[in-house]
Amino acid sequence: MKTPVISAWFGRGTLVAPPDIASATLRSDRFRLEREGDWRRLEAIVARMERGGLKRISDEDLLALPALYRIAASSLAVARETSLDAATLAYLEALVQRAWFQVYGPRRGFAAWLRGFLLGGWSRAVREMWLDLCIALFVMVAGSIVGWLLVARDEAWYYRLVPGGLADTRVPGASREDLLATLGTEESAVGLSSFAAQLFSNNSAVCILSFALGFAFGIPSLMLLVHNMAVLGALVWLFAGQGLGTELAAWLSVHGTTEIFGILLSGAAGLHIGRSMAFPGPRPVLAAAAEAGQRGAVVMVGVVIMMVIAALLEAFPRQLVEGTAPRFLIGGTMLAFWLAYFFLYRPREAGGEEP
């Protein structure tokens, strides 16, 4: 014998939904019918914007977009709160996400971003870190002097500072002819290519680490700069001892004015983060660090570009161009370009004059 409750759920052999399920289904259908027109209109506008941006949107639809987005977002909140059917909830979640990107998301594509980055964004971020640049430059110069003084006092320091891949024939006691041969052109490019690869690998690692370790109040960044430039100081001591200081400077200047400038920027970016954490001012530490990190990230994107340019200069002009004067001309030209770009080139921002 059937219980009254079970009997009430069955008609003549046909399964009938319980009253609470039927009521919920009715509420969901009514909710969707009352608002579906606005959802469909919003979906159509968003679809046109995804295909062709604002060019495909009429003024009427463009003005209605914020209101339609708010209606959809409100509908999603109600759907979640009242546990409407899963299909309606999934549809609204996807629609609101797509509409949010069109209403609040970025308006520029990659080409527009790159144009803004190269035509002002990068150089502006570098100038905003002027104090950190000055500190990093001082530390780098001091590191070179320290490296020179250490090896001048004790030649054993040369082997501690200079990586093994660089210290082939470039060792204390090498003849002038042997050292001069390492500065040759393509005719002696076997050892030169290895030296270039070692320098590029070393300096790229220094750039990445200098920025990444900036959160520790910038101290590791400064230490890396000191060590890296101490290597350079040791090499200059070695070549200058054989009267080849000018030749070495010309050889290094071809790519070094770009590569060392990139190291300077990466060290300053790491120090900028550390200094903002140590001295956040009236702002919370995390907020200050986040702002500095965003500015430093912009600079580091540019450093990647500089490292690529330096690698190309290492691979071609430095190995193909012979003579001190032509090499100094290439290196000096690159240095003048970077200085002019970062400190003389001041385009207007979108809102007017650059401060």
Image (spheres, rainbow, N blue to C red):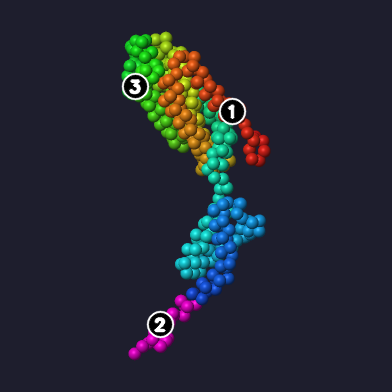
Q: Secondary structure at mark 2?
A: loop
Q: Amino acid at mark 3?
A: Val
Question: From the image, which quarter does the C terminus lie in?
Answer: top right
Whole-percent x, y for residue 55 in the image: 61, 52
Residue 249 visible within the image? no
| Residue under label 2 | 15
Identify the residue at the far bottom of this view.
Answer: 1
Q: Amino acid at mark 1?
A: Phe
| Residue under label 3 | 190
Q: Is residue 14 above or below residue 82?
A: below
Q: Secondary structure at mark 3?
A: helix
Residue pictured at 37% horizontal, 18% vertical: 187
Whole-percent x, y for residue 45 in the image: 58, 58
Q: Nearer the viewer, residue 182 or 138?
A: 182
Within the image, what quadrant is residue 232 found in? top left
The disc, 3 or 2, on the residue closer to the chain's N-terminal end is 2
Magenta segment range?
A: 1-23
Q: Is residue 19 above or below residue 277?
A: below
> Which dot marks residue 343?
1
Q: Amino acid at mark 2?
A: Leu
**Label 1 to label 3, Cα distance in Å?**
38 Å
Q: Nearer the viewer, residue 131 or 180?
A: 180
Whole-percent x, y for residue 242 in the image: 39, 10
**Label 3 to label 2, Cα distance in Å?**
85 Å
